[in-house]
Image: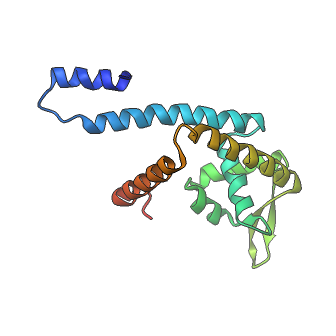
Amino acid sequence: MDQVDRILAQWHQERPDLDVTPMGMFGRFGRLRSVLMSGLNDVFRAHGLSAASFDVLATLRRSGRPYALSPSDLIKWTMVTSGTMTNRLDKLEQAGLVSREKNPEDGRGFVIALTQKGRDLIDAAVTDHVANQHRLADALNKDEQAQLDALLRKWLAAIKIDGS
C-alpha cells in the first residue's frame, strides 16, 4: 500500500458514494511527474540548461540541417507563447548557443540557428538525457514500457489536450 492507496481508503471511508478510482491514477501521475521531472532536471542542470532551454536547443537539433527554424516554427514545436519564446531565445543568444540570421527564403524575416557551441552542448546533453530516460524507465520491462506508451497515446488522443 502506498500513500495514494491510503488517501483513497480515507475517501472510501468518508465518501463511499464516490468512485475515486481516477483520483488514484491522477495522484500517482502527479507524484510520478514530480519524481521524473526532478530526475530529468538533474541532467539539464549538469549541462547548464533548464528544461526550457533544452527544449529549444533539442527542437533545433532534431530539425536537421541547417539546424535553424523560424520563431513561429519554434513556437509551434515547443507550444509556448511568443513572449515566452522571445525570452528563451534572448537568453540562449546571450549564451552563444543560438544566433538570429536572415531567413534565406524570406529576406524580411529571420531564423533561429544553432551555433556550433549550441550544437556541441545539445549533442552532449541529449546523449545524457536519453541515458537518463532509460535509467528512469528501467523499473518497467520493455513490454510494460510499450503497453504504457500505447495506453498514454490512446488516452491523449481521446481527450485531445493539445488539439492535435
| Residue 99 falls left or right of residue 15 | right
Q: Could you say where residue 52 lies in the image, as x and y percent from the top left?
A: 65, 45
Q: Image quarter for residue 5?
A: top left
| Residue 151 falls left or right of residue 64 | left
Front residue (pair 91, 13) = 13
Q: Could you say where residue 32 lies in the image, as x and y percent from the top left?
A: 48, 34
The residue positioned farthest toward the right in the image shown: 116
Task: Locate the C terminus by quadrant.
Answer: bottom left
Q: Is residue 72 above or below residue 122?
A: below
**Picture residue at 71% right of the left edge, 61% below the top:** 62
**Picture residue at 42% right of the left edge, 62% below the top:** 163
Q: Could you say where residue 11 lies in the image, as x and y percent from the top left?
A: 22, 24
**Picture residue at 82% right of the left edge, 55% below the top:** 119
**Picture residue at 88% right of the left edge, 56% below the top:** 116
Q: Could you say where residue 95 lies in the image, as x and y percent from the top left?
A: 83, 45
The residue positioned farthest toward the bottom in the image shown: 105
Task: Locate the N terminus by quadrant.
Answer: top left
Coloration of the structure image? rainbow
Front residue (pair 125, 162) = 125
Q: Image quarter for residue 110?
A: bottom right
Count of numbered circles on the image: 0
Q: Image quarter for residue 132?
A: top right
Front residue (pair 95, 46) = 46
| Residue 87 falls left or right of residue 142 | right
Front residue (pair 50, 139) = 139
